[in-house]
Image: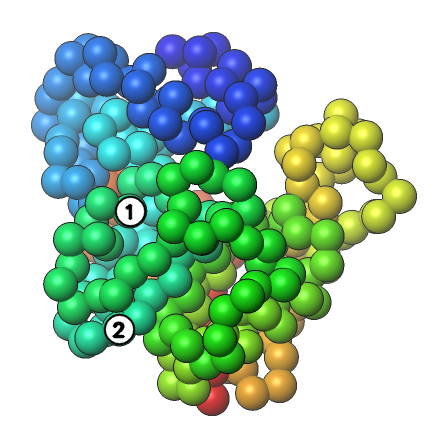
Amino acid sequence: MKKVIKFFLRNVPRKYLQRIVHLSTKTTKLFYLGNNVECPVCGKHYRKFLPYGYVVSRENALCPNCLALERHRLLWLYLNEKTNLFTDNLKFLHIAPELCFMDYFRRQKNIQYSTADLESPWADVHLNVENMPLETESYDVVMANHILEHVDNLDKALSEIYRILKKGGFAILLSPINPKRLSTYQDKTITDPLEREKHFGQKDHVREFGMDYATILKREGVEIIEDRFIETLERGKIIRYQLANPDCLTIENHIFVARKL
């Protein structure tokens, strides 16, 4: 299974990847029946989760049912416990939407939910995050996870996300972070996919964020919150939901929220 998932990750275009992995794991569920781990997103429990990883395969990472990874399960708990997403009437734009969340967000009667992506056939709107044809201050919530490491012009992408966000609204902006880097690393002269993988961790990444990620996100009129929500959770819950290694919590487990003032 490790080899199958890694093959899909490395060879299938992102716009089809989630659906293909979802289909490939349908029969796998039977081999993972049990009650050692639980996914808070879909509520299913298993003997263990599937391995997952682009370069290095992580054990107990991927929910066989909804495809939620560690960061998705943590974020789901955060959204439920620390935001008004499931209680207030909100207009919500989900950029590069994660498959594990989409159906659950659509079911919420209080949310006016729409999805956007550059090329995904399942997105409601196709757009480039660096130049979005959307009205200024039109959304209460924007979620754009694991896209900022892909965009060519980071300043434009952030400016656009903050532009469409209403005052008082918030954006969830998670990205892979290398805790060993003090500052973000990028080199625009590196264009070869294999070289990008070597330097930035993935063929389609154009930068690798470091410990200065919160500073990178900061703009005038926007408050950046680096929430260590995971550190408030009981050890048993972290293990049950397989959110992270409870003995090695790092900046990679933090939730980054941009709130427009």
30 lies left or right of 187: left
Q: Quadrant of residue 171?
A: bottom left
Q: Which mark is residue 102?
A: 1
Q: Residue at x 72, y 45 (%)?
A: 206
- Foreground residue, 138 or 229? 138
Earlier residue among tags 1 and 2: 2
Q: Position of residue 186 (x, y in %)?
A: 78, 50
- Front position in the image: 260 or 124: 124
Tally of numbered discs: 2
| x then y, percent, for residue 123 | 41, 46
Asked whether residue 226 is in view, the answer is no
Query: Which amino acid does the dot numbered 1 rest on?
Result: Met
Q: Residue at x 13, y 40 (%)?
A: 43
- Asked if 39 appears above or below 235 in the picture, the reply is above
How packed mark 2 is, by other alpha carbons closer than 10 Å (few <14, some 14-19, many 20 or more), is some
Q: Residue at x 20, y 75 (%)?
A: 89
Q: Quadrant of the N terminus?
A: top left
Residue 27 visible in the picture = yes
Q: Residue at left 25%, top 65%?
A: 112
- Residue 116: give x, y in percent of width and height: 45, 53
Asked which colour scheme the image uses, the reply is rainbow
Q: Position of residue 151 (x, y in %)?
A: 66, 51
- Residue kind at label 2, given as amino acid type: Leu
